[in-house]
Image (spheres, rainbow, N blue to C red):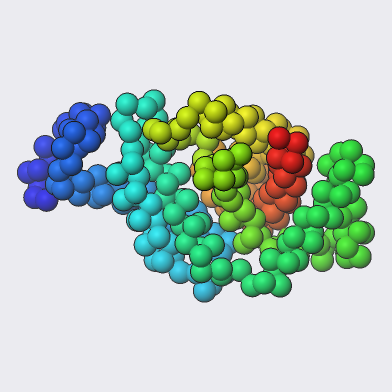
Amino acid sequence: MNQKQRDEFDNTDETVLWKKYKKDPDLIIREYFIEKYAPLVKYVAGKVAVGMPHNVEYEDLVSYGTFGLLDAIEKFDPTKEVKFKTYAMTRVRGAIYDELRTIDWIPRSIRQKAKEVEKIIIDLENKMGRAVEDEEIAKELDLSVDELHSLFSKISGTSLVSLNDVWHGSDESEELSFIETIESPANMNPDVMVEREEIKTMIISAIQKLPDREKKVIVLYYYEDLTLKEIGEVLEVTESRVSQLHTKAIMRLRGRLAQMKNLL
């Protein structure tokens, strides 16, 4: 693409470009969209990179996310009331997490420990009928509160992936992304649309029941797109503490949503 073409596209309403591209896929327009939204891929990759172990390279995350951007360009429907940036962000994030799950970068021991802690939290909350405190979780695990916080830091990587797990609908061929609540596939039938709305309602309900600070972390991270560092500045706590709050919140959400799913 030359500078003249780029300038021409920059001065054209993007909606017009999308309609033109969908009617007759032009590789030049496609290249323009790739270049324009490349910074979005880097932004999402940067967010995901926070809290990841050193063996997960930022450049690799950008590469995974680029595949998500290409997928978004091909599947975006400009007739829907969704901005491409919003749609693409979900696709990019999903592509990154899909690849992370494929390479299984989380050690098995850490994954098992995360499941153990998650089960204990849910069992305690079912027994007590409320959100349990760190002291209560630590006691059940026979740990000090400081040791519990250290454990949350170790297993934080599993929670960064877990909110993107798929939710299987009644039709096992339909996989609904756990946080992909802004997209409506073109071929979705009415029954699946109703089910998606029910899942969205469940997610919102589960989030509303979280302790206040954990709720704020989830909203700021997934819906306001703040980094853990930025959330720490908002809540006036360290980035490490935000990571711990995020991990606890995800464990509560996963357990509660699993229970809700069993009731469907």
Quadrant of the image containing the C terminus: top right
Residue 202 lies, in percent from the top left, at 67, 33
Q: Is residue 61 above or below residue 229?
A: below
Q: Quadrant of residue 171?
A: top right
> What's the residue at 26%, 49% (across, down)?
34
Q: Quadrant of residue 199?
A: top right
Residue 234 lies, in percent from the top left, at 62, 42
Residue 94 lies, in percent from the top left, at 47, 51
Residue 259 lies, in percent from the top left, at 76, 42
On the rendered structure, is 221 left or right of 264? left
> What's the residue at 71%, 72% (across, down)?
109
Q: Is residue 64 above or below residue 218?
A: below
> What's the residue at 50%, 26% (across, down)?
190
Res 261 seen here? yes
> What's the residue at 61%, 68% (across, down)?
106
On the rendered structure, is 40 left or right of 3? right
- Depth check, front residue: 197 or 232: 197
- Depth check, front residue: 145 or 185: 185
On the rendered structure, is 2 left or right of 184? left
Res 43 seen here? no
Please state the total of marks drawn on the protein image.
0
- Depth check, front residue: 135 or 71: 71
